[in-house]
Structure formats: structure tokens, C-alpha cells
Image (cartoon, grey):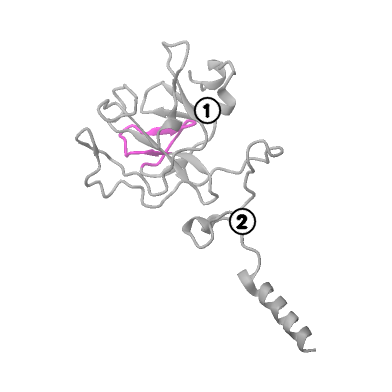
Amino acid sequence: DGGRRAMMARSRSRDDVGGGPRPRGGFEDSEQGKGKGKGKGKGKAGEGPEEEAAPKEEPTFEPSGLLGLEDNSKNGIALKFIVPAEARMPTMKWRIYIFAKQQEKPKIVHIHRMMGILFGKDRRVADVPTDHPTCSKQHAVLHHRLTSTGQVKPYIMDLESVNGTFLNGERLKPARYYELRERDVLKFGMSTREFVLLHAGSANHIAIDPSKLRSDSE
């Protein structure tokens, strides 16, 4: 009997170690874990059919980064934003196709090579110049941000421009981050130039038909 009790005690001690299975994902006890469990996440690329697309996240009404601009400059010019703490280099090869009326082929900007992209007409600081009189010097900024699901997604924020930033024809509220998705179209001020978001998975080896990407107004 004494030997049997000793064996049972050792078995219980092994069962108690770790307190049960650990949750998957690696976000336990962190701020990023607050949003998990809401909806189904997407698996890795190539693992089965893609599930129905989840709705876009609502605009972020957290502090936008327009404050605390001390020591935040480029080429000696103060920037109208700060890089958010959750900014990351993107895991997907995002591109922006820029369409202009006088050009048959779009200009391609490989935005996956940068954590943030500033749009505006001040070429001393702008990563993507907008070159239109109705655009502000620092018009809008795009950041790749780590979400609560562990994915890195592109977000756009209007930098309190005079004539606005437009996402798929709708004017955005300033100083708020809005999630971007593939084939979203951005326009700045009264410019007719369109900035279409695509990633390498859909754009590689595919002939881009400008008529299918431009809005009806073009």
C-alpha cells in the first residue's frame, strides 16, 4: 500500500505542473490579447480556402499621435504625426498603384519597404508626393500597424488637411486611423489622381487594367 500511495502522489504532481494547456497565439498577459476571440482569424497562406472576409475595423479614436511632436522632424521640418507604438514592418508586400489621367500606365510604389508613408506636396518630407495645389504639405500618413489578432495591416490617417482625404469616395475624419484593404482607392484634396492599394499576391504576373481600378468619375 505504501508503494501505491507514493506512485499516486508522483502522478498527481506531474498533472499539476503548468496548470493545464497553455493558450495558443503568444499574446497571453499582453495588451495585444484584449481583442482576441472576436471572430475567426485567417490561417497561413495556402492552408485551405480563405474564409469570408471580416468587416473592416472601425476608425480608431485613440490618441492619434498628432500630439507630442517634440524632436519629431525630417530634414529639419517638424512632422505632424508620431509613429505609433504598434507600427511594424509589413508581412505582406503591399503596393500602391498611382493613376493619373495623362498617364497610360500607373506608377508603382512598393510601400512594404517602409513602416510609414507620408503623402503630401512638400517634397522635403513626403514619401509619396501628391503634387496638387489643393493638397496640404503633409496631407495624410499610412502606417502598418500590429492588430490585436497578431496581423500587421495598413492604416491611413488624414493629418487635418484642408481639403480632406477620401477613401473609396468618402471623406475621412481627420486624426483617425482607418484600416485599408486590397483594391481600396485613396484620393487627396481635389486631385483626380487615384492611389489604388494592391499586394504582390494579386498583382504579380497579372495585367493591370486601369479601367477596372479607377472610379466611375475617372
- Rendered position, 209 above or below 44: above
Of the pair 161 and 54, the residue shown nearer to us: 54
Q: Percent x, y for residue 31?
A: 47, 58
The image quadrant that residue 182 belongs to is top right
Q: Residue at x 31, y 35 (%)?
A: 161
Judging by the rendered image, the residue that carries numbered circle 1 is: 198
Instruction: Describe residue 89's horizontal placement relative to residue 7 as left or right.
Output: left
- Residues tagged 2 and 1 counted as in contact (Cβ below 8 A): no
Q: Percent x, y for residue 45?
A: 63, 37
Instruction: Describe residue 33's horizontal placement relative to residue 161 as left or right.
Output: right
Q: Residue at x 74, y 80 (%)?
A: 7
Q: Which residues are magenta?
A: 156-174
State the residue lying farthest toward the bottom.
Answer: 1
Of the pair 71 and 44, the residue shown nearer to us: 44
Please state which amino acid type lies under the numbered disc 1: Leu
Residue 24: assigned label: 2
Please state which amino acid type lies under the numbered disc 2: Arg
Q: Percent x, y for residue 35?
A: 54, 55
Residue 29: assigned label: none
State the residue lying farthest toward the left.
Answer: 76
Q: Please, what secondary structure does the residue beneath circle 1 have? A: strand
Q: Residue at x 31, y 26 (%)?
A: 134
